[in-house]
Image (tube, rainbow, N blue to C red):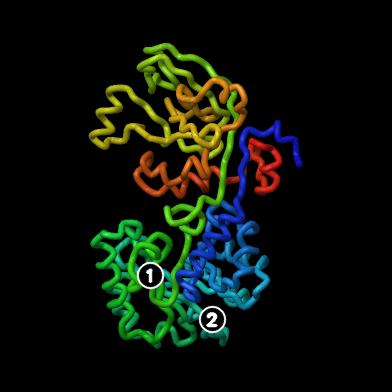
Amino acid sequence: MENLANYDVIRVFKAKAFERNLLKVIEKFREKVGVVVKADAYGIGIKNVLPIFEKYKVSNYFCQDIIEALKLKSLLKNKGANVFTFAGVQRGQEAEFVKSGIIPVCVSLEQIERFNDYAKKNNVKPKIGIHFDTGMNRTGLSITDSEILRENFAGFTSNLDVVLYLSHLYSAYDKGAVSNKVQLQRFKCMTAGLPKAELSLSASGGSFRLSHNFHFDMVRIGAGLYGEIREMEPVVSVYTKILQIREVDKGESIGYFGGFKARKQMKIAITNIGYKDGYSRGLSHTNKLTDIIRAKLKSGANFARSYMVIDGKYKCPVVGIISMNNTIIDVSNVPQEVLNKTEFVEVLGTNANLLDFREANGFVPCDLINSLLAPNPNAVDLTEDEFKKLKI
């Protein structure tokens, strides 16, 4: 093992927790499971999760684009597994899709028509999926596009094997959102009358919180599998060092721009992690009167409820504006004898739950875990067994 004293950040992948999450998914949805592995498996690392997927014979994988998909294909032992790309087949990629057998989920009539023309000229019949936009206004065929496709399906797909129709819910985490029912109805209408193919609408949070009416033939599990919904366990922990502990008098400022004012005598710890390490500046906590007013007016003030954890139980709120290299936390509630023996704090993990940061940013913070796990020369990645030896 490397000299860990050289590193500011320690990142730990919890393989056993990830496996338990996958088993929970398989138990609920059985053969309907498709797994999303875009962004290098949500930052966790495709090489970390793929052996677990293959252990349980997962056969449907979703990447964002051809580059991700080619990497996945090269690692897969099951060469018969289906690998899809959400970005479809972009101009100039046609030959690569045919050669590799990767399945583009086409997002426009132009993609379908162009790929069909290529297939016809080269006398091949590659598989495709088709994405329908049911209300998110991101990618996919519009209602008008779907009508055009239905009227001339054979003309658009004469040399294509359409195996999947899909869409994406934009309020899946909110069980009571009216938009879920609207999108469900649109999906049914947009795919009605088309030749038979598998249907997929539900993903992650929606899969667990919405009824089986949303599940269709394939449930795509993405962020949830990586611990980003309450029904699942956290699968990664991040720790950072404490550089200094100091007393702050009442009325003193903390951090850039005097963003946080001590309203009583405080004890703070300066940690060796900042936005250069992926710890978002949006997790800053200011308490100036002007910022409190702006926060109430929802005008963008940094008024987060982010925290780190010491000794597995002491929640220490972030105070002040997060800087490039440092984040300051309030350790006033931590006994001195605990502080005396503490070198690392938990930034993210079992106790510093990712989902609690929903309060900070107003949405499930998938970006935080991706940022914290991005390549970082100041961070070291450990297995659970390696981490246990440190006795942090």
Question: What residue do we see at 36% from left, 41% from top?
Answer: 359
> Do tag 2 and tag 1 residues touch (Cβ < 8 Å)?
no
Amino acid on which the number 2 mark rests in the picture: Pro
Vertical placement of 36 versus 254: above or below? below
Which is nearer the N-term, disc 2 or disc 1?
Answer: 2
* Observer-nearest of 206 and 294: 206
Using residue 327 as the reference point, say whether residue 305 is left or right of it. Answer: left
Locate residue 177 relative to residue 47 in the image: left or right: left
Q: Secondary structure at mark 2?
A: loop
Q: Nearer the viewer, mark 2 or mark 1?
A: 1
Quadrant of the snapshot with the N terminus: top right
Residue 226 placement, left or right of 250: right
Label 2 to label 1, Cα distance in Å? Answer: 23 Å
Residue 313 point in image, percent of width and height: 50, 35
Q: Dot 1: within a 10 Å radius of its alpha carbon, few (fewer than 14), some, or many (20 or more) residues?
A: many
Q: Is residue 369 left or right of residue 355?
A: right
Query: Whole-percent x and y of residue 213?
Result: 33, 73
20 versus 219 height, above or below: above
Residue under label 2: 126
Q: Tag 1, which secondary structure?
A: loop
Dot 2: few (<14), some (14–19), or many (≥20) neighbours within 10 Å? many
Q: Report x, y in % for residue 382.
A: 67, 45
Query: Image point 42% across, 11% down: which residue?
Result: 249
Q: Which residue is mark 1?
A: 201
Q: On the rendered image, what quadrant is the C terminus found in?
A: top right
Q: Residue type at mark 1: give it.
A: Leu
